[in-house]
Amino acid sequence: MKRLKILAAALVVVQLLWAGLPFAVFADEQEPSVLLICGDTALQKELLESIQAAGQKAQLVKPYAYTAESLTGVSYMVTTESQPFLDAREAGIFAVAVGEKPEVPPDIQTVLIEDTRATLRLGEHSQSFFERGTMRVITEYTGQPLGELQTGKGTQSPFGVIGEGFAYVPWVPHEGLGRVALSALLSRCFGSEAGSLYLLVNEIYAYSDLSLIMETADAFHDAGIPLILEVTPIYDNLDYPAFERYAYALRYAQTRGATVVLGEPVVRPYEMIREPLDTKMARARKALFDAGIQLRELEPQPLSLSMEELETIQSDTRAFGAFPVNTAVVYPLFESSEALAEAVAAVERKWLDFSAYYPAVSLREDILEQTRPIMEPYAYREKTAASLVKAFGSANVVLIAVVGVSAAVFVLLLALSRRLYRRKFYRNMHTKE
């Protein structure tokens, strides 16, 4: 009998798991294939984004924690340090050296240039800038070059070089075309080159302006621009009418061709975790799935560029074209209709050609209308006690009147007491005389 109960419980668990397939959060089975050795916090973030955009998953190890055993089980290494680069090459692991610290590979010569104006070119795109301080550029090399770097000192060199079992990028860019070039080099090293441009609007919360979410979907749909909406996970208060209004806005956006993806959860520093994050994410996915939201995955994560960064990049042709790595032009949710209109105009002015990350979701308009919620603010307190408002109002008036009369009586008594005291005082004075 006990065995039958255990078997029945196991069957129930299996059924629940299968039922939860559309919204369950599964552990990523892909093991990290890239070992990242970097001590600079800001540069870590950039390199992690570039590795992701190149279609790989990275394991980050700080230089002080690195040992030769760290190389076990990885296919690639990206490093800003010299010793890990040498160890990886000796172990036959493809290694990418970034920055001035790593030892320059054989058959490559470099030179340091100070305070120069330079132009970086990648395919049909270019960006000019002024580099303060020193920058190391390649003068001689053996291997496959990527990009072209021209300086005001008259030098012309590749942005990076891919050799036999290694790649080398001596200068580390921090924005614009430099980030694209680094991601493109990693994509070529990993054998995962792609080149699509996407438009993504993020920072969408349950308390965001819902009318602006729908207006954003309308504006980009009417302009013929595929749109990705990245929403922040919601774990609690999923039975509130506010959540249904939020879900309706997302369903409406889907009917206008928008793709809805779930963003990373917001985890505050030192936050006390009372529930596993995977459980909360599963609940968030299920709530959206039950509300009719067709969630998609943004994998691999494209490289993110702001419109401000993109504006600094020039194209040789009227149409801007795409980069040799998947890239998303990212806007936060617009604060006003004017800001939205300005963004649409900027995209059209730049002649950007965006791709759809997924095919548009088909959702019938009649179903959308049937599920349309009341969009007015919801009163979370019952109004059954509203009939007593008049009574309480009358009581307040009476109370104010009583207090006023009491104050008047007190002032009157004070005045009478003062007069009686003065008379008694003067009478005593005359008696003594």
Image (cartoon, rainbow, N blue to C red):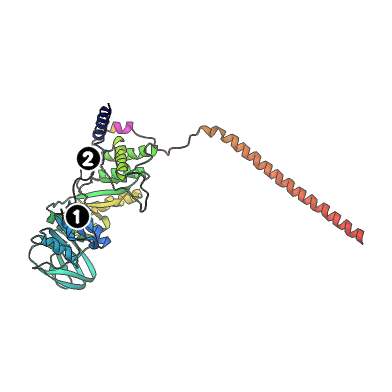
**382 lies above or below 130:** above
Name the amino acid, label 1. Answer: Ile
Q: Quadrant of the C terminus?
A: bottom right
Q: Quadrant of residue 281?
A: top left
Part of the protein shown in magenta = 367-377
- The residues tagged by marks 2 and 1 sit, at their Cα atoms, a distance apart of 28 Å
Q: Nearer the viewer, residue 93 or 20?
A: 93
Q: How many marks overall?
A: 2
Q: Main secondary structure of the magenta part?
A: loop
Q: Earlier in the sequence, mark 2 or mark 1?
A: 1
Name the amino acid, label 2. Answer: Ala
Residue matched to label 1: 51
Q: Secondary structure at mark 1?
A: helix
Visible residue check, residue 122: no
Q: Is residue 148 left or right of residue 337?
A: left
Q: Quadrant of residue 290?
A: top left
Question: For mark 1, does the 10 Å Cα neighbourhood hold few (<14), some (14 to 19), or many (20 or more) residues?
Answer: many
Q: Residue at x 12, y 58 (%)?
A: 94
| Position of residue 127 measured from the top left corner of the image (x, y, whole percent) | 20, 62
Visible residue check, residue 402: yes
| Position of residue 229 measured from the top left corner of the image (x, y, whole percent) | 28, 45
Q: Quadrant of the N terminus?
A: top left
Q: Is residue 317 left or right of residue 416?
A: left
Q: Is residue 124 magenta?
A: no
Q: Are marks 2 and 1 in contact (CB under 8 Å)?
A: no
Question: For mark 2, does the 10 Å Cα neighbourhood hold few (<14), some (14 to 19), or many (20 or more) residues?
Answer: some
| Position of residue 110 measured from the top left corner of the image (x, y, whole percent) | 13, 70
Residue matched to label 2: 360
Q: Secondary structure at mark 2?
A: loop
